[in-house]
Amino acid sequence: MQVRDGEFVVLVGPSGSGKSTVLRMVAGLEEITSGDLSIGDRRVNDLPPKDRDIAMVFQSYALYPHMSVYDNLAFGLSLRGTPRTEIDRRVREAAEMLGIGELLGRKPRQLSGGQRQRVAVGRAIVREPQVFLMDEPLSNLDAQLRVQTRAELVKLHQRLGTTVIYVTHDQVEAMTMGQRIAVLRDGLLQQFDTPQQLYNDPANVFTAGFIGSPSMNFFPGVLTRAGDGQIGVRGDGFAVPLSPSVAARVAGLVGEHVILGIRPEHIADPRQITDPGAVRARARVNVVEPLGSEVYVYLETDGTEFVGRLDARYAPRPGDEIEIAIATDRIHLFDPASETSLTRRAAKEPRAPPDPVRSTDG
């Protein structure tokens, strides 16, 4: 995996997937058992943390409670013997950039959670490092403040242009902040790509299900060919034809078992779907979750359960039987054995090898 100079890369995955371990290896806090880690043109595997020119922002702010904000920001520079005038310049520039200039005389206990988080970020900024490492720095903030602060961090990155590696378990945070996202599972890199590519063209079942809320719907089935040559997927209680663009990628696999995946927004009221080849079906509404402008609808047809996303204007009630449309040009197909994508546009082979590790970057 290669992080480009000045890039904002997010590591995302469930607990235990290896996100923080990767960050700690980059920082020099975790021993690397094999492979090479380079920062710039230097191999840094055996280089101590203090010589790697990185700065880390931890999940816990780790501010010195007895020091003022000014002294918390200045402390690391003082340890390195930075001249006093240079320390003062960097501290005041960072404080102004983060909007905490009027807080320099306060102690951490006098600050809100958001203000403490800014001080922790400021302590990294004054170092002027080659790389910022951030380990779930927003997890201690309330929901509204998280949204506000992640926008501030993105703007800060645009202003500084420094490389950032950011760890989170929140896929919404990853999608909104990262220029590229590395999806990890059990210590294995599943996919490394742009947010839109991850969403539109997932490499495997795990990435498809992890990115997106509600999660992608999955249905086991068999690829079939009708008498008129139409290729589709048939499963328990459903039969879905494939659009020509999707069918062309799997034409050689007719008769084989597959996993059909489709996102909730591609199962909707017929008035919402623009795909001319959309297939219509009837479904019973079990649960409705209103979200203002849209609703999540938990549906069932012939014992098969799935989720759709409807415009609030067409919101049904639990127990209703409604007509839905399925956008067949947005269907994904996966190999049940390896769980890798059979319809991914970036794939060079119709059937992926059994190795679950797939990356779009060398």
Image (cartoon, rainbow, N blue to C red):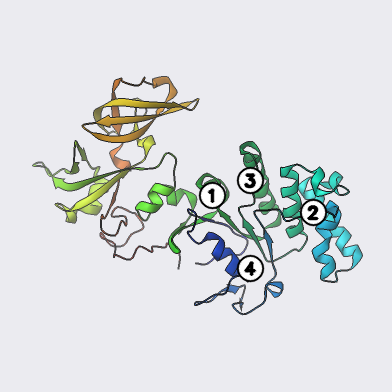
Q: How crowded is mark 3: few (under 14 residues within 10 Å), some or many (20 or more)?
A: some
**N-terminal-most mark, 3 or 4:** 4
Asked if marks 3 and 4 touch (Cβ < 8 Å), the reply is no
Disc 1 marks which amino acid?
A: Ala
Asked if marks 1 and 4 touch (Cβ < 8 Å), the reply is no
Query: Residues under labels 2 and 4: Cα distance?
Result: 22 Å
Q: Is residue 279 above or below residue 203?
A: above
Asked if marks 3 and 2 touch (Cβ < 8 Å), the reply is no
Judged left or right of residue 74, residue 247 is left
**Residue on which disc 1 sits:** 174
Query: Residues under labels 3 and 2: Cα distance?
Result: 17 Å
SS for callout 4: helix
Disc 4 marks which amino acid?
A: Ala
- Report x, y in % for residue 17: 47, 59
- Report x, y in % for residue 117: 71, 49
- Report x, y in % for residue 343: 30, 52
Query: Residues under labels 1 and 4: Cα distance?
Result: 21 Å
**Residue on which disc 4 sits:** 27
In which image quadrant can residue 276 be found? top left
Disc 2 marks which amino acid?
A: Ala
Which one is in front, 275 or 198? Answer: 198
Q: Is label 3 or label 4 in front?
A: 4
**N-terminal-most mark, 2 or 1:** 2
**Residue on which disc 2 sits:** 94
Which one is in front, 193 or 208? Answer: 208
Viewport quadrant of the C terminus: bottom left
**N-terminal-most mark, 2 or 4:** 4
**Residue on which disc 3 sits:** 150
